[in-house]
Image (cartoon, grey):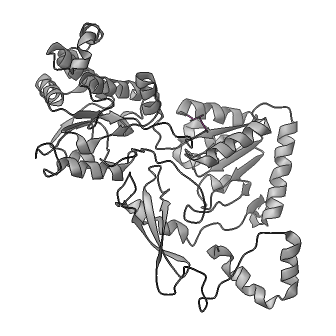
């Protein structure tokens, strides 16, 4: 039973048969109240039960075990058998209970009226929404219902996609402030797989990070931290050799602080540096044997990226470029990582493709200690329209022109994360009805006309595919 409904059903004892008749008339699913004097099967008062789940505090999808005592979640720990985090868990995952027990959480539907927000029942809220959707469907307008959500990686995504296809006038979009769309697009062009790859840091002898805080918050930081620890451990490394990390970035990150070598670089030039290194590898024939037949083509393609020009543009001297290129090529297996801030900028796609070229030249693609892709998942995100900034500007423009009649916002806060110049907040004000599914009164939810609060990840059933799913332990 959900904690929010416990007191309601507890008080049913004083309502007598009237409440019982009401339940039977409404044909709702049966709920049971158990006394801990005679607890339900599998529950022993004073003894904790542990349940396996997946953390949703960020897109990584780490496996967790949740400690339950007398029906209440008490502690969250990492699942040691889960092939992403192997029992480890970051501070955000540990703090998942704060979302569950948030005293300011919205627990009931609310509707905006002249005096402000007013609580209403679920039946009334859904009835009003259904009426609006029917009107929008009959209006004859094209794509006048929009659903904007955080990236969804499970069956719920497919359900929503099916719903809006059936509606006929709706579209579902994916938007997240920590998005990897540039990296995915770069991998789609490079390898035909528009996904975030698995960087096998654990089995690498040499890691080259191009502006990527892979130990900070990017992608799956817990998984990367586990792999990094294994790479640095002489007992699990290559012939007792401790792995090496070289980091280039404009401002030192947590990842850079722990690197063996750290070099400053001009913002946005990470891709130029990678191509300059590729030039050294090709000129000195330090490439993997599998690339020998391509050397002539690569020499021609890399001709514009000579060391003098790259050094001038990046701020990294020629000697450093040559040294790092040689180390990267000779200490196989090696992997170049370019994601996060380096990929989330105007040169992001170029930077990521350049890093892919480095991985290709040294034979790291598809091999242990390099860059790998998981098999496509049947449950993966079906909301394929991931919005880049230009797409959000277009949606904002459509809202200001009143071409959007109903806007759903799910687990994302674009009013806060987008700049005022995007016009998104102004566009929201011009949408006749904005529906928020958040249970937190954030900036976007505060502008909603109807709030239908969703449950937290610890209160709901569902499935989820981790952002980086290796399927086996490193």
Q: Is residue 25 left or right of residue 35?
A: right
Residue 363, image quadrant: top left
Q: Residue furthest front?
A: 41
The residue at the point 36 percent across, 47 percent down is: 472
Q: How many marks?
A: 0
Q: Magenta-highlighted stretch: main secondary structure?
A: loop
Q: Is residue 387 left or right of residue 13?
A: left
Is 281 contained in the magenta span?
no
Q: Answer above or below: position of 417 versus 196.
A: below
Task: Please name whichever residue, 334 or 399, is drawn nearer the observer in this view of the structure.
Answer: 334
Task: Please name whichever residue, 3 or 414, is drawn nearer the observer in this view of the structure.
Answer: 3
The residue at the point 54 percent across, 65 percent down is: 458
Residue 70, image quadrant: bottom right
The residue at the point 44 percent across, 50 percent down is: 60
Q: Position of residue 311 (x, y in %)?
A: 19, 22
Q: Is residue 252 visible?
A: no
Give the quadrant of the N terminus.
bottom right
Q: Answer above or below: position of 207 versus 443.
A: above
Q: Position of residue 174 (x, y in %)?
A: 58, 40
The magenta stretch spans which residues? 383-387
Q: Is residue 108 left or right of residue 272?
A: right
The residue at the point 14 percent across, 28 percent down is: 330
Q: Answer above or below: position of 252 versus 295.
A: below
Q: Is residue 393 visible?
A: yes
Q: Position of residue 143 (x, y in %)?
A: 75, 33
Q: Answer above or below: position of 465 versus 281.
A: below
Q: Position of residue 235 (x, y in %)?
A: 14, 52
């Amino acid at each position: 039973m959900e904690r929010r409904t416990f007191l309601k059903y507890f008080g049913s004892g004083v309502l007598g048969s009237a409440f019982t008749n009401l339940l039977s008339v409404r044909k709702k699913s049966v709920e049971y109240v158990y006394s801990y004097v005679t607890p339900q099967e599998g529950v022993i008062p004073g003894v904790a039960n542990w349940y396996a789940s997946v953390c949703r505090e960020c897109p990584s999808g780490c496996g967790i075990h949740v400690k339950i005592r007398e029906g209440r979640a008490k502690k969250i720990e990492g699942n040691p058998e889960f092939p992403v985090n192997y029992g480890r868990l970051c501070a955000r995952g540990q703090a998942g209970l704060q979302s569950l027990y948030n005293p300011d959480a919205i627990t009931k539907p609310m509707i905006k009226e002249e005096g402000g927000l007013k609580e209403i029942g679920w039946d009334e809220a859904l009835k009003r929404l259904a009426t609006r959707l029917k009107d929008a469907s009959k209006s004859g307008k094209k794509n006048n219902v929009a659903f904007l959500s955080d990236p969804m990686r499970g069956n719920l995504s497919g359900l929503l996609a099916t719903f809006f296809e059936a509606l006929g006038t709706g579209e579902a979009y994916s938007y997240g402030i920590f998005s990897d769309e540039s990296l995915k697009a770069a991998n789609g062009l490079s390898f035909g797989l528009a996904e975030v790859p698995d960087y096998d840091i654990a089995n690498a002898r040499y890691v080259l990070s191009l502006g990527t805080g892979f130990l900070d918050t990017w992608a799956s930081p817990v998984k990367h931290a586990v792999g990094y620890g294994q790479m640095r451990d002489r007992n699990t490394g290559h012939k007792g050799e401790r792995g090496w990390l070289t980091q280039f970035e404009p401002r030192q990150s947590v990842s850079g602080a722990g690197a063996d070598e750290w070099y400053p670089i001009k913002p946005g030039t990470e891709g130029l540096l990678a191509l300059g290194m590729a030039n050294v590898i090709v000129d000195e024939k330090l490439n993997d044997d599998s690339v020998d037949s391509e050397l002539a083509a690569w020499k021609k393609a890399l001709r514009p990226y000579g060391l003098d020009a790259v050094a001038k543009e990046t701020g990294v001297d020629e000697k450093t470029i040559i040294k790092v290129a040689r180390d990267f090529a000779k200490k196989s297996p090696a992997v170049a990582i370019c994601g996060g801030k380096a990929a989330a900028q105007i040169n992001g796609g170029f930077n990521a493709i350049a890093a892919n070229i480095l991985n290709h030249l040294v034979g790291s693609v598809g091999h242990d200690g390099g860059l790998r892709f998981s098999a496509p998942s049947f449950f993966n995100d079906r909301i394929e329209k991931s919005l880049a900034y230009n797409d959000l500007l277009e949606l904002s423009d459509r809202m200001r022109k009143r071409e959007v009649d109903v806007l759903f916002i799910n687990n994302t806060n674009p009013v806060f994360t987008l700049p005022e110049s995007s016009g998104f907040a102004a566009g929201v004000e011009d949408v006749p009805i904005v529906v928020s599914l958040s249970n937190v009164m954030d900036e976007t939810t505060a502008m909603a006309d109807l709030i239908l609060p969703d449950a937290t990840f610890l209160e709901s059933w569902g499935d989820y595919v981790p952002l980086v799913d290796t399927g086996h332990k490193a």
